[in-house]
Image: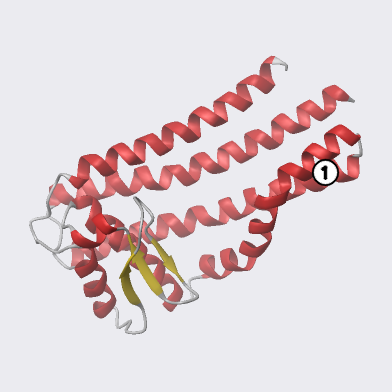
């Protein structure tokens, strides 16, 4: 394996692991900081939905650490147990962020529609891309190899479209929490720090995918 390929491979791995470690550390840090308003994540989510006049979205408790998400098919905001039940800065920030996605859906935010359009292809690509690439490399058939690369490209496109959607949801969350008087000035800065760390995981994932595409193209060129 050549030097640049090694840098791309391990650089991507380290970046993704570092970003995931960072968001977990920020979550642990801000899970220990209570919000003066004393609302739990679930209460905040419902308050924001009511404020925005959205009554067809439910808030439920899910399972697993940092498993929080909004499901547009069922119109359910699912919050992990700690986020659902506690009033920490981390819980309030994450809950507001996920409700931000529900608001995007209700308002037909353009990025959400585009992301949902590409999502099925991204899921298929995520399952098949590496298998197709490996077959292409070992069979030395360019058509198969580049089909796999195209699949990685679909994943990268999905990740690129996801970035503004995530940043917009975080911006909505901070704005709503501030407008509603939920966060003090200090708590607002903590919330931004928490959500910025979470958003960077999406940036890292995109960079890692692009690095893998470049590495595979270099590998293919060298083998040719």
Which residue in the structure is indicated by mark 1?
146
In the image, is residue 77 above or below residue 167? below
Quadrant showing the N terminus? top right
In the image, is residue 92 above or below residue 26? below
Residue with the most extreme top position: 3
Quadrant showing the C terminus? top right
Q: Residue at x 32, y 84 (%)?
A: 55
In the image, is residue 1 above or below residue 46? above
Q: Position of residue 99 (x, y in %)?
A: 34, 67
Figure quadrant of residue 53: bottom left
Secondary-structure class at tag 1 = helix
In the image, is residue 64 above or below residue 75? above
Colouring rule applied to residues: secondary structure
Disc 1 packing (10 Å; few <14; some 14–19; many ≥20): some
Q: Position of residue 66 (x, y in %)?
A: 35, 51
Q: Position of residue 109 (x, y in %)?
A: 48, 71
Q: Is residue 202 visible?
A: yes
Q: Residue at x 16, y 44 (%)?
A: 32
> On the rendered structure, is 1 left or right of 13?
right
> On the rendered structure, is 93 left or right of 203?
left
Depth check, front residue: 143 or 168: 143
Q: Residue at x 72, y 42 (%)?
A: 130
Residue with the most extreme front position: 63
Q: Position of residue 61 (x, y in %)?
A: 30, 66
Count of numbered circles on the image: 1
Q: Is residue 107 visible?
A: no
Q: Residue at x 33, y 60 (%)?
A: 97
């Amino acid at each position: 394996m050549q030097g640049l390929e090694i840098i791309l491979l391990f650089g991507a791995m380290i970046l993704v692991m570092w970003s995931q470690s960072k968001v977990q550390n920020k979550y642990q840090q801000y899970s220990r900081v209570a919000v003066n308003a004393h609302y739990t994540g679930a209460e905040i989510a419902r308050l924001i939905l009511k404020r925005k006049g959205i009554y067809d979205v439910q808030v439920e408790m899910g399972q697993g650490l940092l498993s929080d998400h909004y499901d547009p098919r069922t119109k359910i905001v699912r919050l992990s147990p700690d986020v659902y039940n506690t009033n920490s800065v981390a819980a309030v920030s994450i809950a507001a962020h996920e409700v931000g996605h529900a608001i995007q859906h209700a308002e037909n935010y353009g990025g959400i529609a585009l992301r949902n359009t590409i999502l099925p292809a991204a899921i298929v690509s995520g399952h098949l891309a590496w298998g197709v690439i490996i077959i292409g490399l070992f069979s030395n058939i360019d058509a198969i190899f580049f089909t796999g690369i195209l699949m990685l490209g679909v994943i990268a496109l999905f990740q690129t479209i996801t970035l503004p959607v995530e940043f917009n949801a975080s911006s909505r969350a901070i704005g709503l929490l501030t407008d509603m008087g939920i966060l003090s000035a200090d708590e607002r800065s903590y919330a931004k720090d928490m959500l910025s760390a979470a958003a960077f995981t999406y940036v890292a994932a995109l960079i890692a995918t692009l690095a893998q595409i470049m590495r595979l193209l270099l590998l293919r060129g060298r083998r040719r």
